[in-house]
Image (tube, helix red, strand yellow):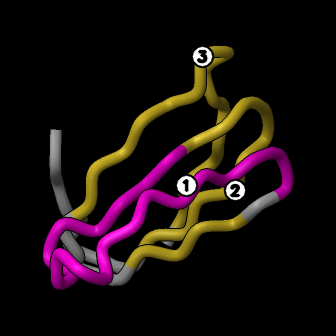
Amino acid sequence: PSHSHSSFTAHLILSGKLTITYLNDPAENRVKTTYAVGDRIDVAAGRVHEVWMGEEGCTYVMGA
């Protein structure tokens, strides 16, 4: 389900894949981006997003 976080979050992918989209982006600019091992995803506080894990799952660490 779509959600947001109250503070900035950084996600570092340790295994598998993660796909993310930002639901408040204008529809014509909205894309799904997939990240893999070693990638870092930064999400601004309050930015509504939706996430899907890859078929093999995904292990990541999340910090602020």
Residue identified by numbered label 1: 62
Residue 46 in sight from this viewpoint? no
Along the viewing direction, whichever of 31 and 35 lies nearer the viewer: 31
Q: Quick one: which residue is furthest to the front in this view?
A: 28
- Residue plotted at (40% across, 67% down): 31
Q: In the displayed structure, does residue 27 sit left or right of residue 60? A: left
As shown in the figure, which amino acid type bears the numbered disc 1? Answer: Met
Q: Residue 23: within the magenta?
A: yes
Mark nearer the N terminus (1 vs 2): 2
Mark 3 vs mark 1, foreground winner is 3
Mark nearer the N terminus (2 vs 3): 2
Give the percent coordinates (x, y) of residue 25.
21, 81
The disc at residue 55 is 3
Give the percent coordinates (x, y) of residue 57.
61, 20
Along the viewing direction, whichever of 21 and 27 lies nearer the viewer: 27
Relative to 11, does residue 64 appear above or below in the rendering? below
Label 2 packing within 10 angstroms: few (<14), some (14-19), many (20+): some
Which type of secondary structure does the marked residue at label 3 adopt?
strand
Give the percent coordinates (x, y) of residue 59.
66, 31
**How many numbered marks appear?**
3
As shown in the figure, which amino acid type bears the numbered disc 2? Answer: Leu
Residue 26 in sight from this viewpoint? yes
Which type of secondary structure does the marked residue at label 2 adopt?
strand
Residue contact between numbered discs 1 and 2, judged by CB atoms under 8 Å: yes
Task: Write down the region rendered in magenta.
Answer: 19-38
Label 1 packing within 10 angstroms: few (<14), some (14-19), many (20+): few
Residue identified by numbered label 2: 12
In three-dimensional space, the C-alpha distance between marks 3 and 1, rounded to whole angstroms, equals: 20 Å
Q: In the displayed structure, does residue 2 sit left or right of residue 38? A: left
As shown in the figure, which amino acid type bears the numbered disc 3? Answer: Glu
Residue contact between numbered discs 3 and 1, judged by CB atoms under 8 Å: no
